[in-house]
Amino acid sequence: MAIDSTRRAKTFGAARERGAIIADDIMIRADMVTGDELAAKFNMSRQMINMRFRNGQLLALSTAKRGRRYPTLQFDCNGRLLPGIAQVIAHFNGDSWGAWRFLSATHIELESRTAFEALKGGKVDEVMKLLTAISDGAFS
């Protein structure tokens, strides 16, 4: 039985609204900072941040309500970008939210750590192998 178009529109509208609420919750976290905050925190210029973002070397999430935010989880305690971040971003072809979901999720294959945590531990090869396996249809 086909769902009528009005019911379908309501269902998808409600799903979009739930997604926007979840995205907003992510964007207001303490580890999500604006470009200005990132520049101050790690002593970088805004130009360097923008260039790295445009070149796919820096992860940023965007929403219409909050603008662009940078997860500080992609940096070590000295402000260096974690090795492997650019590779993950490239794998997602610019889909920052897809990269975020992968990096922030706990993966049993990474000893029940997030990909961010694994990258901080130098496990770039393991993270990329998992990402490739997931892309090829393997699920945990």
Image (cartoon, rainbow, N blue to C red):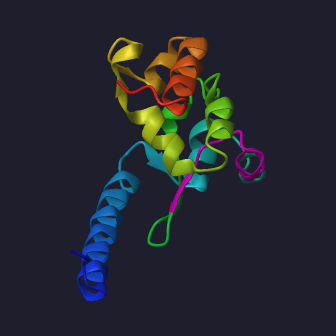
| Residue 23, above or below 14 | above
Q: Which quadrant of the figure has residue 113? A: top left
Q: Could one spot residue 77 in this view of the protein? A: no
Residue 43, percent across and down? 66, 39
Instruction: Indicate left or right for 82 with 28 as reference.
Output: right
Residues 126 and 54: in front is: 126
Horizontal placement of 76 versus 113: left or right? Answer: right
- Of residues 108 and 61, the one nearer the viewer is 108
Specify the quadrant of the image occupied by residue 18.
Answer: bottom left
- 48 vs 38, left or right, is right
Q: Residue at x 31, y 56 (%)?
A: 25
User: What segment is highlighted magenta in the picture?
Assistant: 50-62
**Which sits in the foreground, 28 or 110?**
110
Viewport quadrant of the C terminus:
top left
Can residue 112 be seen in the rendering of this structure?
A: yes
Q: Is residue 77 above or below residue 126?
A: below
Q: Is residue 3 above or below residue 80?
A: below
Residue 75 belongs to magenta span: no
Report the label total: 0
Membership of 61 in magenta stretch = yes
User: What residue is shown at x 57% (from left), y 17% (from top)?
Assistant: 129
Query: Is residue 75 placed above or below 56 in the rendered structure?
Result: above
Q: Is residue 49 rendered to the left or right of residue 31?
A: right
Q: Residue at x 65, y 22 (%)?
A: 83
**What x and y, as percent, mark residue 49?**
71, 47
Which quarter of the image is occupied by the N terminus? bottom left
Image coordinates for residue 51, horizontal then vertical, percent = 78, 49
Percent of width and height locating residue 40:
60, 45
- Furthest residue in direction bottom, as rendered: 6
- Report which quarter residue 76 is drawn in: top right
